Amino acid sequence: MNAQEFGSYLKGLRKRQGLTLKKLEELTGYSNSYLSQIETGKKGIPSPEILKKLESPLGEKYSQLMFRAGYFEWMYDEEADPMYDTQDLGFVLHQKRVLYGDIELTDQDKKLITLYINALVSERTKKA
């Protein structure tokens, strides 16, 4: 998903919640002009920190926002397996091993795994 597509996705989430850009500004602390530029793709893919602030107002899980933004793209091939459970890191890593044999994790992979685990922990903590 490129920045423009991701921005459209975020705009759809915002509208689904019945939020204006001005209201989203109040809820996140980001200016409505900045948020508009994210929605049009002019600012590129938002950082994980921005996505975290958008999670609650947009009513979307942080891990899902991270995945859609492409931060977990290396773990998942939607065309190859549309039934993948992206919420289960162990399953994802197991499937990678089944498909590709023993895998070596790069530093970037380790960083993304850490972000992913933090997102899952955050979601489970909210539910408890």
Image (cartoon, rainbow, N blue to C red):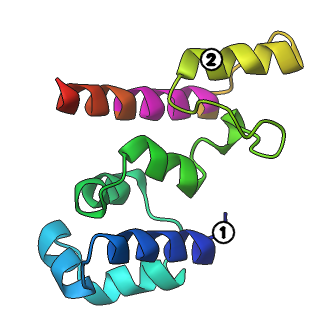
Residue placed under numbered mark 1 in the picture: 2
Q: Residue at x 26, y 77 (%)?
A: 18
Q: Amino acid at mark 1?
A: Asn
Whether residue 111 is in magenta: the answer is yes
**Rendering coords of residue 65 (x, y %):** 45, 52
Residue placed under numbered mark 2 in the picture: 91
Q: Residue at x 66, y 44 (%)?
A: 73
Vertical placement of residue 85 versus 4, above or below: above
**Rendering coords of residue 92 (x, y %):** 65, 23
Residue ranking furthest to the bottom: 33
Asked which secondary structure carries label 1, the reply is loop
Q: Amino acid at mark 2?
A: Phe
The residues colored magenta run 109-118
Residue ranking furthest to the right: 100
Viewer-nearest residue: 12 or 117: 12
Mark 1–mark 2 distance (CA, rounded to whole Å): 26 Å
